[in-house]
Image (tube, rainbow, N blue to C red):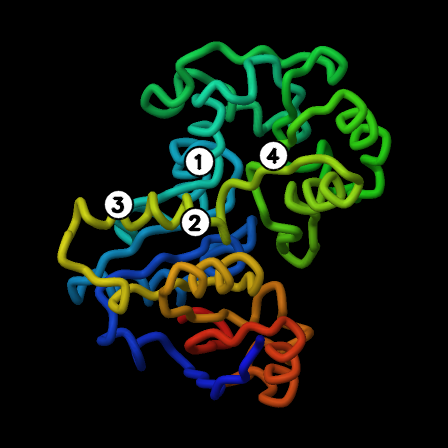
Amino acid sequence: MYIARMIHTIECFAEIAQKYKAIFCDLWGCLHNGKESFQKALEALYDFRRAGGYVLLLTNAPRPSDSVIKFLNQLGVTSKYYDDIITSGDATRLGLQSGKFGCNIFHIGPAHDLCFFDLNIGINMLSKPINLVPISQASSIVCTGLFDDKTEEPCDYKSIISAGIEYGLTLLCANPDIQVDYGHQRLWCAGAIAADYTKAGGLSIYFGKPHKPIYDAATNKLKNYDPSIKKSEIICVGDGIRTDILGGMSYGLDTLFVTGGLASEETGTYEGARSPDEKKLRQFFERTKLTPTTSINYFQ
């Protein structure tokens, strides 16, 4: 049963930074929009680390962390702003390594995600060669996204979904996000395909936020830096109410909801505004039945 909590908003992270020793920070919508990075957000991370805090980036990017790091470097999000990175792509590759889903894979996703299957990326992440095959020959499906997210929508995948269910294939979702903002364009993600696959009667297995394994991986990595950090000293930052915030809350962590990302229209958050519209924000939390620890218009 959902119980409404008091809404707490801030204008900059420095207002609450002293309460925490570590940040689990989302990427897309918080630190960049796919085309450019957000300088004020990076400065907030830099200041937090300079004061002795640790920053772990948790992303539902379907690619291995090595590939994501290269992309981040191009946007100016360099290692001086964070200590480590955990991707849902890494978590999915670990799932494949278990051998439960076979080695003959039908891939749903763009060509630039093929690095997911590269044995040379990651440390012993894939111990067996993966064969990319037609769906009729597959042992399972791996979905990293749409083939062309600039022009396609989930409804374009009805025939593929029907075929996968007919062959009894499990779908591994390497990015549970439903949508992201690329510049000013909203694009569909793998999570939307997986949701439709499940609705149609198929089995979808999700890797990444809001699911527990990625938080286990993050807390284990954090122990390498400071094993004494408690859950109460970690805050999850993100703009996805059903991924970043739900995941953090479910794991027992404090959360900071960035209202100016995916939910900017629903929360009445606009550039130049000091805070989201309080009435719209309250209504949004009531609809989603989720109230984060704190909210901020843009991470800064």
Please name the amino acid that badge 3 sits on: Asn
Nearer to us in this view, 110 or 1: 1
Q: Check disc 2 and report the residue beneath it.
A: 212
Query: Counting residues from the N terminus, which is met first, the one under dot 4 or under dot 3?
Result: 4
Mark 1 and mark 2 lie on one chain; the one further toward the N terminus is 1
Point out the tag, 4 or 2, that comes first from the N-terminus. Answer: 4
Q: Which mark is residue 220?
A: 3
Q: Earlier in the sequence, mark 3 or mark 1?
A: 1
Is the Cβ of the residue at disc 4 closer than 8 Å to that at disc 3? Answer: no
Q: Identify residue type, mark 2.
A: Lys
Marks 3/1: CA–CA distance: 13 Å
- Measuring from the top left, give residue 45's x and y in whole percent: 31, 62
- Residue 152: x and y, percent? 79, 40
Q: Residue at x 63, y 25 (%)?
A: 111
Element on which disc 2 rests: helix
For the residues labelled 4 and 1, the Cα–Cα distance comes to 12 Å
Q: Quadrant of the N terminus?
A: bottom right
User: Quadrant location of residue 25?
Assistant: bottom left
> How many neighbours does mark 2 have within 10 angstroms: few (below 14), some (14-19), or many (20 or more)?
some
Disc 3 element: helix
Q: Nearer the viewer, mark 4 or mark 1?
A: 1
* Circle 3 residues within 10 Å: few <14, some 14–19, many ≥20: few
Mark 3 near mark 1, Cβ–Cβ under 8 Å? no
Q: Which mark is residue 91?
A: 1
> Above or below — where is 47 with respect to 133?
below
In this rendering, the label closer to the viewer, 2 or 3: 2
At horizontal 40% and vertical 71% (from top left) the residue drawn is 300
Query: Which residue position holds label 4?
Result: 144
